[in-house]
Amino acid sequence: MAKKIRDIPSINKVLEHPEIVELIHRYSLNNVSDLVRNIVSDIRKDVLAEKLEPSLQLIVSNTKNLAEEKWNYSPVAVVNATGVLIHTNLGRSSLSASAINSMSVAAGDYTNLEYDLSHGKRGSRQNFVSTLINQLTGSEASTVVNNNASAMLLALAAISSNKEVIVSRGESVEIGGGFRIPDVLKLSNAKIVEVGTTNRTYAKDYLNAVSENTGAILVVHASNFKQTGFVHSPTITELVNIGAEKGIPVIHDLGSGCFVDTTQFGLPPEPTPKESIINGVEIAMFSGDKLLGGPQCGIIAGKKDVIEKLNRHPLYRAIRIDKVNLAGLTTTLLHYIQENHLEQIPVLKMISQTESDLRMRSIHLQKSIGKSLKVVKGYSTIGGGSMPGETLPTWLLAIPGEEKSKMIFDLLRKSNPPVITRIENDMVLLDPRTVLPKYDGVLISIISKILS
Ligand SMILES: *Cc1c(COP(=O)(O)O)cnc(C)c1O
């Protein structure tokens, strides 16, 4: 036993190993020697417990693995072959080439973020972007914050703090990640007044709930779940009419900021901010990184005096949009203004890919890899809490792995870059719709290698 302990290489010996020297170049002597010390002490315990033979090579490979796990970049690029377009766990929307370029400029250069170049004095980071939002949604004014969740918090805190907010029981929901409407209302100091029932709420339910303490009517778009059957909810117009009669603002949370007519892709209509504004809501709010296809942000569009109130609220500063996302957003909005959004914005390009194009892509992958791959009909989904239950027809590349499916699925996930897939009916399925075309070649070599 004593001999085995003596056989454990010294820290210095480990630090002189060529592979560790290379690691030190990358991660610094301090970091690597801390790691080696911890690993050697763990190994010493295992050797004492007679679970392990002392080995220099084991220490070196453990150190390398742990260093890479701890200090490599994250997030890393992954290939999204899941067929879920706005995959929240995989970072939601991929941005257009020009949006990426403007984000890189904003990150690396000084910019006129809050500097008025025509007058040589302090400006506002909202001026340029809000002009674009107003043009696209028909709003009087608009402002952008960190995400839609914070937009909702700001709106409620500024408009209805210490007042009652009327919400349908069918819309007092959880958006995701524990973000629940009743909790947001509590956090913004508003008192929730729930009306109607889970499945049916009428305009008169709202009307009956109005009191002298009512601060707002809140409408939350059911974005991540679907009610069918015996259901009813009033139209936005009905609620706006009640609001106008009683002097109460209507706040509309649309979830996914959709700027296109989704019926052109065979999908059901998704409410747009423009319709909401035309219908007369006080403010409409939505995410920038769902169907809009931009970076993470929350956009609030509506009446001028309310937007000014939001911009002056102390919470605004705590949740304001950063310069990099702002640059990505303005460039994304410019695509809609230049009417090249369907060609330039990846999420819209993915949605509008035709079945025959997808079939050709899958067949190309199948032919290039050979083996016993199949091309089967399947369905892509929108995701990101948008359009629950709705699908787009696609053609999947299927690896009939049988009992090895789980292993193939894991190997794909552990490859470089990681490929994220799904398993159905003992087959590993890859949907080309969500795979950025630049990865087709990479996919071919990764799958070929795994199957050989
Ligand atoms: C997604 C969503 C939110 C939250 O938006 P984030 O941008 O993720 O903060 C809020 N409300 C609705 C209805 C949503 O669908």
Image (spheres, rainbow, N blue to C red):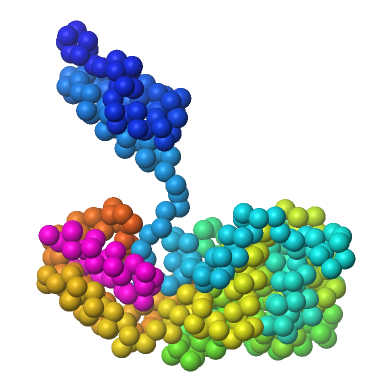
Q: Residue, x 62% and y 84% (percent of image)?
A: 338
277 lies left or right of 286: right
Residue 243 in sight:
yes
Residue 185 in sight:
no
Residue 225 x, y percent position in the rendering: 48, 74
Residue 82 x, y percent position in the rendering: 34, 68
Q: Residue, x 48% and y 92% (percent of image)?
A: 264
381 lies left or right of 329: left
Residue 171 x, y percent position in the rendering: 59, 73
Q: Is residue 431 magenta?
A: yes
Q: Residue, x 28% and y 79% (percent of image)?
A: 361
User: How many numbered badges does the structure rendering display?
Assistant: 0
220 lies left or right of 178: right
Residue 83 x, y percent position in the rendering: 36, 73
Q: Quadrant of residue 154?
A: bottom right
Residue placed most toward the observer, 223 or 122: 122
Dominant secondary structure, magenta = helix
Q: Quadrant of residue 334?
A: bottom right
Q: Quadrant of residue 313?
A: bottom right
Q: Residue, x 51% and y 87% (percent of image)?
A: 262
Residue placed most toward the observer, 305 or 58: 58
Residue farthest top in this picture: 2
The quadrant of the picture occupied by the C terminus is: bottom left
The answer to whether residue 372 is above or below residue 342 is above
The quadrant of the picture occupied by the N terminus is: top left
Residue stretch in magenta: 426-452
Q: Is residue 441 magenta?
A: yes
The answer to whether residue 441 is above or below residue 14 is below
The answer to whether residue 2 is above or below residue 83 is above
Residue placed most toward the observer, 339 or 236: 339
